[in-house]
Image (tube, helix red, strand yellow):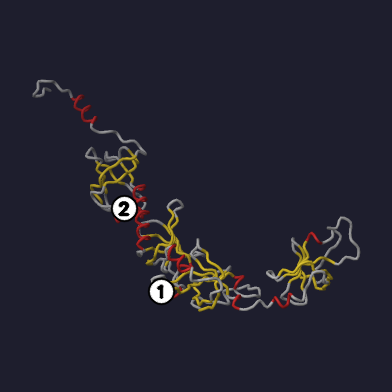
Amino acid sequence: MTTNSGKATSMAELMAKHKSSFTVLKRGESVTGTISKLTPSESLLDLNGKTEALILEKEKKLARAMMAMLKVGEKVEATVLSSESDSGMPIVSLRKYLDKKIWEKLFDIQKKQEKLHVHVKMNTKGGYLVETEYGLDGFLPNSHVSFDKHAEDYTGKTLEVMIAELNPETRKIIVSQKPVLSQANFDEIAKTLKTGTKVEAMVSHITQFGVFVSLPVKTAKGEETFVDGLIHISEVAWEKVADLFGMFTVGDTVEAVVTGIDTSAKRIDLSIKRLTADPFEELLKKYSVDQKITGKVEKITEQGVVIALEDAEIEGFIRKEKIPPTTKYAEGEKVTATVTDVDAKKHRVYLTPVLLAKPLMYR
């Protein structure tokens, strides 16, 4: 073979010249290219005019996100999965690039306080597992479900929500059907809810440990919105409460008093029992240190012995370390003891046994 210049060019030289214009791709390598084709059946990436690579995403939700988030002509970063497919083309993945782009999109939606569509995958004890329209999974807590629709099972349905919390490092996405307040707006509203402020709120969710409520408030601009509140089971009544589900129903209106602000959770701590005076304060006045009292053994625990006193609401307690090694108690047994301390908060009177003789090594 002879060129116009008269120089001979062999086939080997031609092949070598062709190869020098193309670098062999290695598995795991990052490359930059432009999307030249984007369809559900086939997507291609132009690697700077040197060759085309096949974009492969096996997961359906990633493939759907790719169709929704990317466009032909967009310059992207890809990861090489294989240097050559059956068709002779390299295979690349846009997973990392797509993931970064999706999180940027979610942060933008949160900042602008726009609505997001999610598909409800499963109902759990604490709320709903959801999948966002961009393929990432999230969580809708029961306390963030609109109280007027809470009784409905959303499994399999598509909901319109707001983004309450995002954390790319832990892959955490929390969504809410309620208006989502910024930290600045919450802090501004919290200033108006001083400890002791009486409020009315709507029950939005009931758990074993407390009652979640929606508290109507106004922003600095005078706009009406809601903040979350929590009435812990210990703040429902002065008496011991065993079953909150029998006491409250979602949608109930309750009166409560503000006891604190949970800034990190953007939630108001509330109490119902503190709307009234503690009835045990008068009962506890009957007991004083060094007073001798009589009661019956109600329960024996690892920590000590519970004594039923004359006032059923007040609990007597003998700590384990105050019981002599030779002394044994049985449930129902009558006991005489001396008051050593009165705990108004726990409604408990601490006792020590009345001994006829002080045993050896007694503390």
Q: Which residue is mark 1?
A: 224
- Image coordinates of residue 346 in percent, x first then y, are 69, 69
Secondary element at image label 2: helix
- Image coordinates of residue 239 in percent, x first then y, are 66, 75
Q: Which residue is mark 2?
A: 66
Q: Earlier in the sequence, mark 2 or mark 1?
A: 2
Query: Within 10 Å of the Cα at label 2, are there few (<14), some (14-19), or many (20+) other Cα atoms?
Result: many
- Image coordinates of residue 181 in percent, x first then y, are 42, 66
Q: Is residue 60 above or below residue 29?
A: below
Type of amino acid under label 2: Met
Task: Please report the residue visible at 84 percent of the width from the left and 71 percent of the height from the top.
Answer: 336
Asked whether residue 116 appears in the rendered view, the answer is: no
| Quadrant that contains the C terminus | bottom right
Secondary element at image label 1: strand
Quadrant for residue 13, please give it. Answer: top left
Type of amino acid under label 1: Glu
- Image coordinates of residue 80 in percent, x first then y, are 33, 40
Q: Residue furthest top?
A: 7
Q: Is residue 77 above or below residue 71?
A: above
Q: Residue furthest left?
A: 4
Task: Please report the residue visible at 84 percent of the width from the left and 63 percent of the height from the top.
Answer: 328
